[in-house]
Image: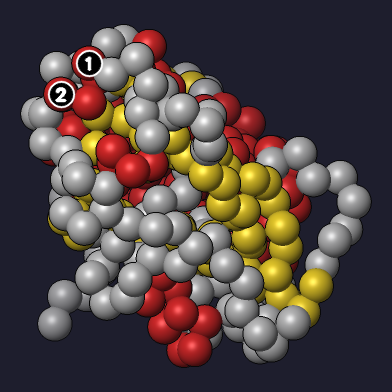
Amino acid sequence: MYRPKSTVEQWRIFQAVVDCGGYAQAAEKLNKSQSSLNHAVAKLQQSLGLSLLEVRGRKAFLTPEGEVFLRRSRKLTHDMENLEQLADVLASGWEPILRIVVEASLPRRPLYQALAEFAPRSRGCRIHLVEAQPAGCRAVVAKQAADLLFACRTFPGVTCLPLAATVYVPVCAPDHPLTRFPAISAHELEHELELVLADGSEQEEGWDRAELRWIINHLHDALSLLRRGIGYAWLPQEVVSPLVDSGQLQQLPMVDLALRKRFTHLILPRATPPGPAASLLLTLTRQHYGIREETTSAS
């Protein structure tokens, strides 16, 4: 079994001597006796079998070996400080991990903005960001398997916060036959292949679907197929607008200008109140969705 030849305190003293330029200056800064610092560095060098410092007059200078060990030791002490700070953070109730689940068809820009603002304040909290289909969202709620869930529907017995309405528009590739029509009716779409974001376990609620449809589990796959001229799809306007502007996709002109809407809800699946990290991310998320007043509801 490996046994360390040195201690973290010895490396801290070694760094202090280097940073302060000598033993006397380091002793004053650390509020220790000069002899104790001399002893600590001497013991460190003896255990390593290397000379790290050379004393010339009242100043200490690094040897070539000392320069190498100084860089490595700074990482060691920095990691130790982070480890001890993490213990303090966890002892205060700060969550080590936040699991976030987002329904596949929903746009995420405000969430990404909230996460970007959360990152420098995360205090070591790790984020698990997962995409799910409606059936998966129901399972998350049933099992209380996430801290935050973004879904199109609400769920009874859990806190549901309304965030924003998402507009869905029909899009296809620029060379798709549907783009030849100056205006398209819902009847004409019934005879075309539709790419539906779902997991195949249930019929989408509220929207009549075409007879010809492919079930696509991920938004990335749907967009890739659309750009290759396969079918059409109703997708979030926020997601497809850059692709329409760049000419990769084309929005279909509907006769009645009927656009489809879904509401994004932020669900708190757990029975216990959110911890401090989840509460911070919740606040940031609501801010980036433009929610100012508390509109919490539990069905």
Rendering coords of residue 92 (x, y %): 71, 73
Depth check: 31 or 255 in front? 255
152 left or right, relative to 67: right
Query: Is residue 109 among what the camera can see?
Result: no
Please rate how many residues cluster around mark 1, counting C-alpha atoms within 10 Å: few if below 14, some from 14 to 19, many from 20: few
Which residue: 16% across, 54% down? 212
Q: Amino acid at mark 2?
A: Pro
Q: Quadrant of the C terminus?
A: bottom right
- Colour scheme in use: secondary structure
Q: Which residue is most to the top?
A: 246
Residue identifier under label 2: 177
Vertical side of 32 occupied by 245: above or below: above
Is the C-beta separation of discs 2 and 1 under 8 Å? yes
Residue identifier under label 1: 180
Rendering coords of residue 174 (x, y %): 21, 17
66 left or right, relative to 147: left
Vertical side of 48 occupied by 73: above or below: above
Rendering coords of residue 60 (x, y %): 43, 26
Q: Secondary structure at mark 1?
A: helix
Q: Amino acid at mark 1?
A: Arg
Please rate how many residues cluster around mark 2, counting C-alpha atoms within 10 Å: few if below 14, some from 14 to 19, many from 20: few
Mark 2–mark 1 Cα distance, whole angstroms, equals 6 Å
Q: Quadrant of residue 53?
A: top left
Depth check: 148 or 200 in front? 200
117 left or right, relative to 198: right
Which residue: 69% across, 51% down? 163
Rendering coords of residue 98 (x, y %): 51, 66
Total numbered circles: 2
Query: Is residue 191 among what the camera can see?
Result: yes
